Image: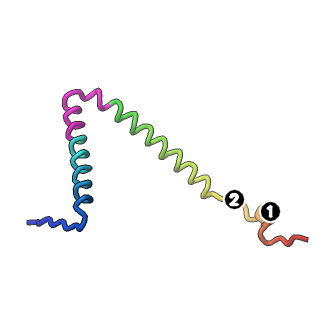
Amino acid sequence: MIVWRFGSGDPHLARQMASKTLIIGLILIGLGMLILAVPQLVVIPLAVLFFIIGFFCLTSAWRLFWAGRGGSADPQQKDQYEDASFREIP
């Protein structure tokens, strides 16, 4: 059996965490009841939300792949560019 022991020197912190946990729990129970009562009302906005998040992830991955490519893969083209950090100013 697991015994939960919470010890905090600040009772305000514990009350604040308990209230936030209570609100989250009530929202989740309400969402579950709403899904049981009217499934199409909840499923369509959730599907739209998942599509938006999915497209955001695809866009981010695409940008990261392009950023990770760096320069060209041809080593002969590297010599054509000058690194400005090593150039002396006359």
Residue located 80% across and 62% down the image: 81
In the rendered image, which residue does mark 2 sit on? Answer: 71
Residue located 22% across and 53% down the image: 18
- Can you say which quadrant of the picture contains the C terminus? bottom right
Bin the neighbour count of mark 2 within 10 Å (Cα to Cα): few under 14, some 14-19, many 20 and up: few
Report the magenta residues as a range: 29-43
Camera-side residue of 7 and 75? 7
Bin the neighbour count of mark 1 within 10 Å (Cα to Cα): few under 14, some 14-19, many 20 and up: few
Magenta stretch holds residue 74: no
Q: Position of residue 10 (x, y in %)?
A: 25, 64
- Can you say which quadrant of the picture contains the N terminus? bottom left
Magenta stretch holds residue 41: yes
Tell me how the rendering is colored: rainbow
Residue farthest to the left, as pictured: 1
Q: Secondary structure at mark 2?
A: loop
Camera-side residue of 73 and 88? 88
Query: Which quadrant would residue 52 be assigned to in this image?
Result: top left
Query: Which quadrant would residue 25 be assigned to in this image?
Result: top left
Q: Position of residue 71 (x, y in %)?
A: 69, 59
Residue farthest to the right, as pictured: 90
Tell me which amino acid carries mark 1: Tyr
Q: Position of residue 8 (x, y in %)?
A: 22, 66
Does label 1 or label 2 sit earlier along the sequence?
A: 2
Question: Are discs 1 and 2 less than 8 Å apart at CB?
Answer: yes
